[in-house]
Image: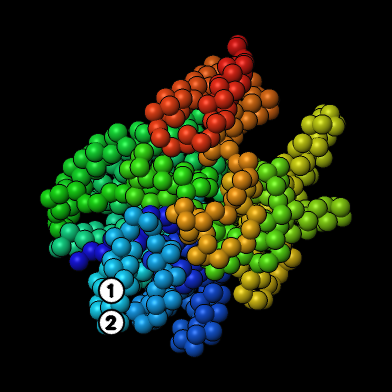
Amino acid sequence: MIKKPLHNFHIPVMGLAYTIDSPIRVAQYGISSVISIIDDEIIEKMKNFYSKKLNLNYLSVSTKIDDYRARRITDYLDMVDDIVNEKFEAFKDEISKNKTALKSFMEMLPNTSELKDGLQNFLNRNELASTIKNFIETHLSPGSIDVNIMTKVDKDNFKDKQQLPVIYNDAHASLRGFAKSKLSSSMVLSAGMNPRLYSYIEEFNDFFPNESGQLKKKIILKVSDFRSAMIQGNFLAKKGLWVSEYRIESGLNCGGHAFATEGLLLGPIMEEFKQKKRQLIDSAHQLMIKALEQKGKFVVPEPLEMKITVQGGVGTSEEHDFLLQQYDVDSIGWGSPFLLVPEATSVDSETRNLLLQSKEKDFYLSNLSPLGVPFNTVKGTSNERIRQEKEKKNRYGSSCPKKLLALSKEYSLEGICTASKKFQDIKFAELEAEKQQLNDIEYQNRKENIAEKACLCVGLVNSAYLESNLEIKGEKQGVVICPGPNLAFFDQEVSLSKMVQHIYGNDDILGDKNRPNMFINELKMYVEHLKKELNGFTENITNAQIKKWNTFKQNLLLGVEYYENLFKESGFFRKDIYLMNQLSEYKLEILEVEIPKI
């Protein structure tokens, strides 16, 4: 019997380590969460931390052994699975014997939950513990221990100056680590298509259906539009691989890296997925059958389950329910708000206090990332403070101890990170050579663009080290954090139970704050993004660029029109008296945006 998920929300991956042990913290309550598995060093540290804390017998994996990255990941995931299962068994035992604990758990379940109704019936009839335990055993399941691989972080690796085979690339090794683990869960692939990595999935049987038509390991693709989903899904289907979930994320109203669409807004994107889901399923299934037959593997006559989920900027139970009902989605990602829940995420006290105190103006889209992709962050982090102190002494760049983002081949075939001292020293030398040809503003802008890059490999894991009191070796880097702008409206540290009750509308941690609707917030960001791009464009304008801007503007106007019709017809958001006025104001603002002509 396949048990239904207990919840209709999940905790997405956050940074390299903010959700590094979230399953250990929340899975026993049926809450699914996602671990980043790209950084084997933090994974090894956390494995050793829990092994010591819980008296487990997991051994350290030295960097000197062959394939240590994958082995570290496999060991950690196996350990997390062991801990989660043990905690889950203890939790089931507790709620079957302790009515107070059972009631507390029931408060965290969705109001529409059949499990909640069933447990309430047992309480009303004052059933024996053994009867309740039977029911719990049949209906309860832990949250999924899912993993995330950012496909762009797939650096070539070298040993003794010799390039290693592709399977030792960072993302490839991470994939292998998950594939060899005993987990039965999902791998989230984010940041776009990596054909080499996608092809490597074929090497592992757990990603193919077994004789019962079941997948031990599933693939989730994080996408920003339907076209991308269709292309990537069909690419994998031709290899006999099934995408079990498309996780749609707002391009700008999200945490971490922001992959902006060409003005396509979340509502219209979700509508397209709703209307064309059958097309996505049928197309992939036909291709998958052919591939499975050719490979001599078990063929599934009917399409496997395909979920559609969404995340990015959700902040109220009303928005949560709207997405579930309007677009028939299976689950909704609540990311950044969980940074304020100590029971759920690994965040040090200084950084959490910063998030609590920060206002809307403090959250911004930066150029911190060495990937060259806009990156959501907040002002006042310890990393920002340390970098500013170094810059006063004319010291720039990181020592680059991990080299996960050493992807630039501009000066070395082995790759250099643009946040490293080595890279920035070269760039500053080039800038000084050109200084006479630049005015002061151009010079300062270029200097700032070089220096702004932050060492994410270290900055995004330091919070977990600090929270767990683990030693931080090497150069002082501070903490980088990547919350979505929606976090500006959350200013309380809350318990896990309180946050979950907020999601389901049984509590309210926002109060009467003047928080715009999530769709309005995203629209605002896209209008600002277009204006910023137009104002900051310094290259020669081509017909192709003009066409791109016009498409962007037209997509925004079509999005506004879609929302106008949607909100008139929907019973949701009726209390938001400003909604239609805000749409009208942004429509005028978009119409006033002038696209240049050649």
Q: Is 146 on the left or on the right of 275, as rendered?
A: right
Q: Quadrant of the N terminus?
A: bottom left
Q: Nearer the viewer, residue 88 or 241?
A: 88
Q: Secondary structure at mark 2?
A: loop
Residue 141, image x and y in percent?
Answer: 32, 69
Q: Residue at x 45, y 87 (%)?
A: 57
Disc 1 crowd rating (10 Å Cα; few below 14, some 14-19, many 20+) is few
State the mark number for residue 575: none
Q: Residue at x 82, y 40 (%)?
A: 432
Disc 2 crowd rating (10 Å Cα; few below 14, some 14-19, many 20+) is few
Q: Which residue is tagged 1?
A: 125
Q: Is 224 on the left or on the right of 391, as rendered?
A: left
Q: Nearer the viewer, residue 164 or 151?
A: 151
Residue 429, image x and y in percent?
Answer: 78, 44
Residue 106, image x and y in percent?
Answer: 39, 66
Q: Nearer the viewer, residue 107 or 36?
A: 107
Three-letter residue code for mark 1: Arg
Q: Quadrant of the C terminus?
A: top right
Estimate the spatial distance between the alpha carbons at disc 1 and disc 2, rounded to whole Å.
9 Å
Q: Residue at x 32, y 67 (%)?
A: 120
Q: Secondary structure at mark 1?
A: helix
Q: How is the image coloured?
A: rainbow
- Labelled pair 1, 2 in contact (Cβ < 8 Å): no
Q: Is residue 119 above or below residue 392?
A: below
Q: Which residue is tagged 2?
A: 128
Where residue 128 sits, quadrant-wise, is bottom left
Q: Is residue 523 above or below residue 454?
A: above
Three-letter residue code for mark 2: Leu
Q: Residue at x 35, y 33 (%)?
A: 272
